[in-house]
Image: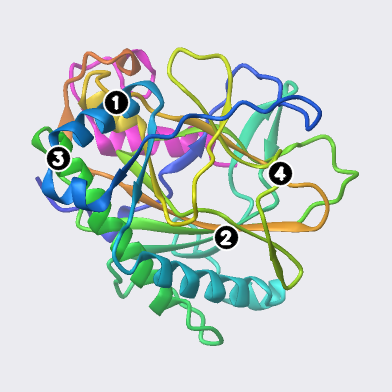
Amino acid sequence: MTPLSTQQVASPALVHSSDEIPTETPSTAIPTIALTVISYNDLENGNPESLLRLKAALKIDGIIGVSTIPEYSAKVTSFVEAIRLFSAKPEETKQLVAADDGKIFGYELGKEQFFRNNQWIVDDSKHSYYALVPDTSENKWPDHTDLKTPFQAIATLMSDVGSMMMDRMGLLNSTTLADHSMGRMLHYSKSSDSETNNPYWCGDHYDHGLFTGLLPAYYFRGLNEVEEPAESGIFVRPHASSTFKKVVADKSVLLFQVGEFAQLCTNDAIHATEHRVVKAGGDIERFTLALFFSPPLDAAITSTSTLATDLRYGENTQCSFWQWHTASLNRYRA
């Protein structure tokens, strides 16, 4: 299959409309997911028991964690410092490296939407910075902050671990990975307590690629790091469940969740992860990084997954990732 063209890459994380499920309030006990975590050594060595746990968790919960990754903590710390420096710049300064029309390389503010209370709402508190991993000449980098070095360092490590995980699962038997993954820095800006019409930094959605690697989120009030508020964070809806559950993980744990194309490739052996990010009240900001794994755009599959009934799959027996990717962009980009 032809390698993924860097000129055709766009964001693989898009918001789907879904039946609105009430958000837990701070006065209500917030359900949490029993996150499955395996060690990096067990993943690297292909420990059979750990791999069974991994596959079971991805089928039911759609999310897992990997711990004790070499050099992980230091690279995360450097990255968070860099994105906070960049995010503190005036908006007009950040717009100097804004993504060009038709491409997503560089800075972006509020370009995705989700359906809530019978209307489409734009995620206008979500600041993003997109870059291909490994680095290419098409990436845009600011000249006032060294964002490139820590971004590429942690994203490359995430790419290595994610590729190993998919290989151990046998997922790469049915498809291959594109030459580049898309990294997305995420800065969720602080919100006013009076903003009650939208309780989410990011609405209910599935990622439409293969897998997504997620750094643990870091929260700040001004210059001071704070613990994740009990009511805030990433919430996932396990397969066949009607309840979104909060993901609680140590900052040393790298998360991976399933995308829709992986569900298509495996004929529902694993399930795509519906998730949301719930806002923190007051003047708290959230920082993280997502890394999206996708196959080459011309990768074509024949799937018996329940997702094959989605209009994006089409009426033919085969569906290419280019078709799935483009239809997803057209449906959910604001």
Quadrant holding the C terminus: top right
What's the distance in space between the residues labelled 4 and 2, CA to CA? 19 Å
Rendered position, 134 above or below 215 = below
User: Which SS class for mark 4?
Assistant: loop
Which mark is first along the chain, 2 or 4? 2
| Residue drawn at x 30%, y 71% as measured from the top left | 135
Query: Spatial distance from mark 4 to mark 1, Cα to Cα?
Result: 28 Å
Question: Is 327 one of the magenta-colored residues?
Answer: yes
Where is mark 4, residue-wise? 279
Distance of label 3 from label 1 (alpha carbons): 23 Å
Identify the image quadrant of residue 242. Answer: top right
> Residue 299 location in percent, x, y?
17, 38
On residue 96, which mark appears?
none
- Segment tinted magenta in the rendering: 309-334
Between 24 and 27, the one nearer to me in the picture? 27
Q: Which residue is mark 3?
A: 47
The numbered mark, 4 or 1, whose residue comes first in the sequence reads 1
Determine the secondary structure under disc 3. Answer: loop
Mark sitting earlier along the chain (2/3)? 3
Nearest to the observer: residue 324 or residue 161: 161
Q: Which residue is mark 1?
A: 263
Three-letter amino acid code at disc 3? Asn
Q: Amino acid at mark 4?
A: Lys
Q: Which mark is residue 108?
A: 2
